[in-house]
Amino acid sequence: MKRLIYFDKQFLREPDFTDEQAYHLGMRRRLNAVLHTSGVADGLDVVRKSDSEITVASGIAIDTAGREIVLDADQTLDLGTQLQPNAKVVVAIAYTETPDPAGEDEGGSSRMTEAAEITVAAAAPKGSVVLATFTATGDRKIPTTALGGDARQIASAKLAPATVGAKELGRGAVTSDALGQKAVTDAALADGAVKRPALGAGIITEAHLDPALAGRITSTAAVEALAASQQRLTRALHTPGIVEGLTVVKDDSLSKQTVTISPGVAIDALGRELVLTEPTQRSTAHDGTYSIGIFRNATGVAEIYADRQAPAPEANVVLLARYKTLCTNPGPRSQMCVVPGNVGDEFDGGVRVMAGARVTRIPGGAGRANAAWRVTQVCDQQYPNNTVEKLPEWPFTSTGGTLLLFASGSGTSAIPNNTIGMHIIIDDVARATATVYVKVPDQRQAFVVNGLVVTDVPAGTHKAAISRRDTNTLMNSTDRVTLTILELPF
């Protein structure tokens, strides 16, 4: 590699100046290529302007040769006939240079214009940088969803193997924006280099992982392994409920419809800790019975539940209190509804359960006592009539494992020599059936039931129900059905 040197009275010609520029351009582009991955360095976002138009924002990209691609102003493109029904569209940008006619003199053009060329096609041209991908709609329009896609290339610094260790990463230093697509590769990771305190929850996703890492690093293992381990341990050692705080009291500071939930901690049926760090107010201004609880929302943050409808079982809400509002004119046209009681009163409503330790002991090997030996009678009622195929569902909570079901019921059939019975349904699946053989029609008989074993039940809140075995099974208000669930600690 050569570069020019100068001295007094030196005679310079056109090749000398060309070589001077070539040296600096080549050196800069070489450094760009070896120190950075190709992709968008800044801006160049692609947004939908109309059914057939897109706008590419100004910005800078670096291609595989290390050349800077500069778009100095927003550019709008009408895709027109380039949009085909349900066809993939790739928006890319590439480096171009052309002599500037405005700078021509007797010896030729004295200026070179460097520009950015935007292409829209089914595939990106070789050497270009992908800005966005999307699929046209069936009626040849640009979709209204965000344009971009996983194929968008982001420029980033290249790291030598084992460059990033625990000392180089501050807590929260690695963010989703800081990771390029497929940036996490086997060569870039030394064993133990990236530790959990340096990562925010959910930062490393499938898009950031090189496919070659399959089996070594998964999108969940990098961030969630420790949390999952702690969750399993908590579920195994504690029953769900309130650990501390989370009291619900009447509070008139905002209005007479307000309750305040104090800071505290709870554990849900999945073993997750629910932490409320600040006093939280909820308004209960309508006629009805309100359930107040705490649950983990979709973003992983503890949130207060306050509604007249009971929480769905799958939400794994830990109930804190339940009360009925007082209204001046109860019903749909109630004039004013307030929280009952006096300011400072603490509510319970019989639903508040404290978390506890699961204790197992085997005294002398003769027996076993365990907090997980829980018995719940979920149903004891009359069957309404023959038109009802299934009774309403009843929620129950399990720590997971094996359930022993005890069900009783009776019925009859209009058909002689026929088997009748009822299904015991867990989470919308018939897991067991109690039956009896009927010889004489229209004669009520009890269903024969032994202990019915249901295995591999996951931890959490479940739904139980009872239904007729078939239309030949006739049941009405003279038939009483019960369902009792014994949870075994294994």
Image (cartoon, rainbow, N blue to C red):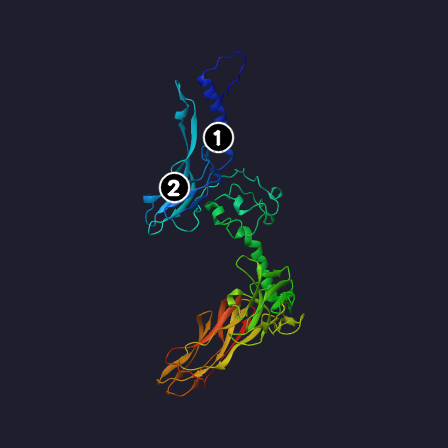
Q: Quadrant of residue 254?
A: bottom right
Vertical comparison of 23 with 315: above or below: above
Residue 357 visible in the picture:
no
98 and 326: which is toward the camera: 326
Q: Determine the image quadrant of residue 238.
A: bottom right
Q: Secondary structure at mark 1?
A: helix
For marks 1 and 2, the one nearer the N-term is 1
Disc 1 crowd rating (10 Å Cα; few below 14, some 14-19, many 20+) is some
Q: Which mark is residue 268?
A: none
Query: Do the residues bearing badges 1 and 2 touch, measured as CB atoms within 8 Å?
Result: no
For the C terminus, which image quadrant? bottom right
> Left or right of 100: which side holds 222?
right
Whole-angstrom CA distance, mark 1 to mark 2, is 29 Å
Between residue 83 and residue 48, name the one nearer to us: 48
Residue placed under numbered mark 1 in the picture? 29
* Spot occupied by residue 32 in the image (x, y as percentages of width and height): 50, 33
**What amino acid is at disc 2?**
Leu
Q: Which residue is mark 2?
A: 77
Does residue 106 sit above or below 128 in this rendering?
A: above
Amino acid bearing label 1? Arg
Question: Does residue 294 appear in this view?
Answer: yes
Q: Is residue 83 above or below residue 359?
A: above
